[in-house]
Image (cartoon, rainbow, N blue to C red):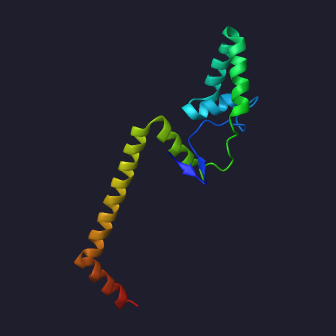
Amino acid sequence: MAWTNGTQRFRLWRDTDRGIIAGVCAGIADYIGAEPIVVRLIAVAGLVFFFVPTVAAYVVLALVLRPKPPALYASRDEEAFWRGVNTAPADTLSSLKRKFRDLEDRLAQMESQVASGDFELHRKFRDLGR
């Protein structure tokens, strides 16, 4: 699991920033990687068909869940990365492999440039011009 400053990044929080009442639906949506409107529509359907259990579950979750810390992620990219780890770990792993492969290819190209005889020749020509 991902931990930051003693706080587990990947858990169920109340998202009070994107929430309407207490942030429970927004927190659930964030946890499962869905849009908050979808979870809210399911909650409304639950209110229509199962009023008492839905209200009870919402109140319990609003009391039990802690609010999402404001500085949970350092950047949008980090948040997107961890959301991808949760919703599609295989895609995230293949994306990381691709990035590392690209970095390795670039490093190999730089190494071949520096290790070639032309590099030393170009450096000596450059030094002559000074």
Residue 115, position in %: x, y?
A: 26, 75
User: Please, is residue 68 above or below residue 53 in the view?
Assistant: below
Identify which residue is drawn at 68% across, 15% down. Answer: 53
User: Please, is residue 38 above or below residue 108 in the view?
Assistant: above
Residue reaching furthest right?
Answer: 21
Residue reaching furthest left?
Answer: 117
Residue 34 in the figure: left or right of residue 90: right
Residue 15 in which image quadrant: top right
Residue 112, position in %: x, y?
A: 26, 69
Residue 86, position in %: x, y?
A: 49, 38
User: Please, is residue 49 above or below residue 61 in the view?
Assistant: above
Residue 10 in which image quadrant: top right
* Pick the front one: 66 or 24: 66
Instruction: Tell me how many marks there are.
Output: 0
Residue reaching furthest top?
Answer: 49
* Pick the front one: 112 or 50: 50
Identify which residue is drawn at 63% across, 48% down. Answer: 72
Give the position of the C terminus as an image quadrant: bottom left
Identify which residue is drawn at 37% across, 44% down. Answer: 94
User: Please, is residue 61 above or below residue 9 in the view?
Assistant: above
Residue 122, position in %: x, y?
A: 30, 81
Identify which residue is drawn at 72% across, 30% down. Answer: 62
